[in-house]
């Protein structure tokens, strides 16, 4: 079962699970996910795929999981926008904590083998000193946004259920995931935003001086970590990133060259609360999951530009 399975990462995970001949249930309220992300899967999977349009916070989710009895639950459904969590921390906690508890209660009722949880590597460690980069899981978990707090608390619940009910879990602390299907209008990453702006000839805005860094990890690589975590890394938080930093300016130069656009970005003041530098040490995932990222940034951004270009072409035809 994949909660949030109509989202950007979730739908890519669903495709991978179906390709490996698993039977998959998707739970998604379609508030940010889209059935379009599952169009190919629904057309070809037949009875292997069932989509349930349902809010992860609802009591019905517990009953559904109990009935469907999944062996593994990949829990990706979330309120994933840091700024939205600051504006409305109650809603953020409602989705991310109550939703996680519903999933855990369902997993208990279904006697599931494991819950694999999408944690947040970008917020979990707060703002450690730059000398700590790339960040290891052993660093204190000190999130500074309500979103980060709710994700940390969800890990605490996973640990409690492991002790109380012998429900195994793996938690993946994700770096800045990017790739095809990422929505440039949602809580999007900068890669999706740049791709759409560059291909539509709109001005690109960079907040701050553009020297802030992120650890960009490609969605297919991340999905591979989720699949591995279904049977490995029990009881652990594992960072899923590349371990390297890329500045926003570097990203813009790479993508504008790939798009064949000779435009200059506009610079505006840095938004409050934005991290200046970020990268995650993936060593534990290498040891525990046998995982490492393999998609180079240039290849990944080219795939995003190709995807966005095809989508824009289709919408123009439509």
Image (spheres, rainbow, N blue to C red):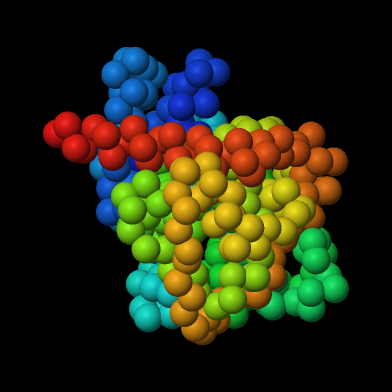
Q: In the figure, is residue 265 to the left or right of 127?
A: left
Residue 24 higher or lower than 196, as above or below: above
* Residue 13, placed above or below residue 122: above
15 on left or right of 43: right
- The foreground one among 129 and 300 is 300
Whether residue 155 is visible, yes or no, is: no
Q: Residue at x 59, y 63 (%)?
A: 248
Numbered disc total:
0
Q: Position of residue 110 (x, y in %)?
A: 48, 38
Q: Is residue 102 above or below residue 210?
A: above
From the viewer's perspective, tell me whether residue 199 is left or right of residue 161: left
> 28 and 66: which one is in front?
28
- Farthest residue toward the front? 262
The image position of residue 158, as x and y in percent, is 61, 56
Q: Residue at x 81, y 41 (%)?
A: 286
- Across and down, in percent, residue 188 comes to 43, 57
Query: Residue at coordinates 62% horizontally, 52% vertically from top-left?
Result: 216
Q: Dividing the picture into quarters, in which one does residue 128 lie?
A: bottom right
Q: Percent from the top left, x then y, of residue 18?
A: 47, 21
The reply to whether residue 87 is in sight is yes
**Position above or below: 229 against 92:** above
What is the quadrant of the N terminus in the image?
A: top left
Q: Is residue 200 left or right of residue 277?
A: left
- Residue drawn 77% across the image and 44% down it: 285
- Quadrant where the C terminus sits is top left
């Amino acid at each position: 079962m994949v909660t949030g399975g109509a989202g950007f990462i979730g739908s890519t995970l669903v495709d991978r699970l179906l390709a490996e001949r698993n039977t998959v249930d998707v739970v998604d309220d379609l508030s940010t996910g889209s059935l379009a992300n599952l169009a190919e899967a629904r057309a070809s999977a037949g009875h292997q795929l069932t989509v349930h349009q349902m809010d992860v916070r609802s009591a019905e989710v517990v009953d559904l999981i109990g009935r469907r009895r999944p062996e593994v639950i990949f829990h990706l459904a979330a309120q994933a926008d840091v700024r939205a969590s600051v504006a409305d921390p109650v809603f953020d906690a409602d989705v991310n904590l109550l939703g996680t508890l519903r999933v855990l209660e369902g997993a208990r009722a279904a006697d599931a083998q494991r819950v694999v949880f999408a944690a947040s590597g970008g917020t979990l460690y707060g703002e450690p000193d730059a000398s700590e980069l790339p960040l290891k899981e052993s660093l204190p978990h000190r999130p500074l946004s309500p979103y980060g707090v709710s994700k940390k608390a969800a890990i605490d619940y996973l640990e409690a259920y492991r002790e109380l009910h012998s429900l195994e879990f793996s938690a993946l602390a994700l770096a800045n995931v990017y790739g095809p299907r990422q929505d440039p209008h949602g809580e999007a990453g900068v890669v999706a935003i740049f791709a759409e702006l560059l291909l539509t000839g709109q001005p690109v805005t960079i907040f701050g001086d553009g020297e802030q860094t992120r650890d960009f990890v490609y969605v297919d690589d991340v999905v591979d970590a989720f699949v591995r975590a279904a049977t490995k890394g029990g009881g652990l938080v594992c960072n899923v990133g590349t371990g390297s930093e890329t500045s926003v300016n570097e990203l813009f130069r790479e993508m504008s060259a790939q798009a064949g656009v000779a435009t200059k970005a506009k610079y505006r003041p840095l938004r409050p609360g934005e991290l200046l530098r970020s990268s995650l040490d993936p060593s534990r995932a290498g040891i525990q999951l046998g995982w490492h990222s393999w998609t180079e940034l240039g290849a990944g951004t080219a795939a995003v530009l190709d995807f966005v270009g095809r989508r824009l072409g289709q919408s123009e035809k439509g």
